[in-house]
Image: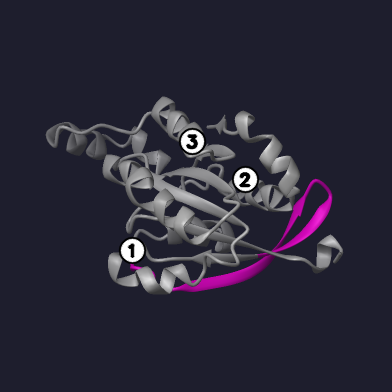
Amino acid sequence: MLPLDKMVKQITVVGDGGVGKTCLLISHKDKMFTEKYVPTIFENFAEEIYVDGNLVNVELMDTAGQEESDRIRLLAYRKTDVFLVCFSVAAEDSYENIVLKWIPELRQHKEDLRIILVGTKADLRDDDETKDRLVLSGKSFVTAKKAEELCKHIKAAKYIETSAKTADRVDEVFEEAARLALQERDFWVESDDKRCCQIL
């Protein structure tokens, strides 16, 4: 078995277009935030993450959520160790699509799913313009309670609410993903009924 510092773990980010997947990765990698939205085609980069005293080599995979990118996106799934399944807390449709699209797609193409559910754009909870827009459209924010219920339903390991704009909990998302990737499969299976803890 390879030592930890020689092993490469792949972490793949999925979710609807526009939920902030690329911004999450940029905030983590470059410690910066961009307001500009550019649909992702397919990008990845490698880094080292220290977890519990261990140095873990990880490959972070960004994917596009648009339907026209389905075939390209699926290429990343086979070698993925942990999926970061993302939705925007300010977009109920992206939350609903976790069950309607993303989990069925992942289960179809990957066994032994290891998932961290990520609620993005948490800073918008305090944004008056976003609040007004949601009220006018008859919608609301995805509550932490609803997110936790979804986390348990899809058997994710954790729910982490984060903001790429403020960098709140961003690095923690990837540290938890690296930690999850290192867990033995037997531990993961045996812990099935204890999955999902909430990190806000």
Task: Give the prevailing secondary structure in the magenta stretch.
Answer: strand
Query: With 53 as the anchor, is 189 left or right in this view?
Result: left
Residue 105 % position (x, y): 41, 56
Is tag 1's residue or tag 2's residue first in the polypeptide sequence? Answer: 1
Query: With 192 as the anchor, is 109 left or right in this view?
Result: left
Mark 2 crowdedness (10 Å alpha carbons): few <14, some 14-19, many ≥20: some
Amino acid at dot 1: Lys
Q: Which residue is mark 2?
A: 172
What residue is at 59 percent from the left and 71 percent from the top? 45
Q: Which residue is mark 1?
A: 36
Residues rendered magenta in the picture: 37-58
Judged by depth in the image, the label closer to the viewer, 3 or 1, is 3
- Asked which secondary structure carries label 2, the reply is helix
Amino acid at dot 3: Cys
- Asked which secondary structure carries label 3, the reply is helix
Residue 111 % position (x, y): 57, 55
Amino acid at dot 2: Glu
Q: Is residue 33 visible?
A: no
Is tag 3's residue or tag 1's residue first in the polypeptide sequence? Answer: 1
Disc assigned to residue 151 = 3
Mark 3 crowdedness (10 Å alpha carbons): few <14, some 14-19, many ≥20: many
Q: Is residue 53 magenta?
A: yes
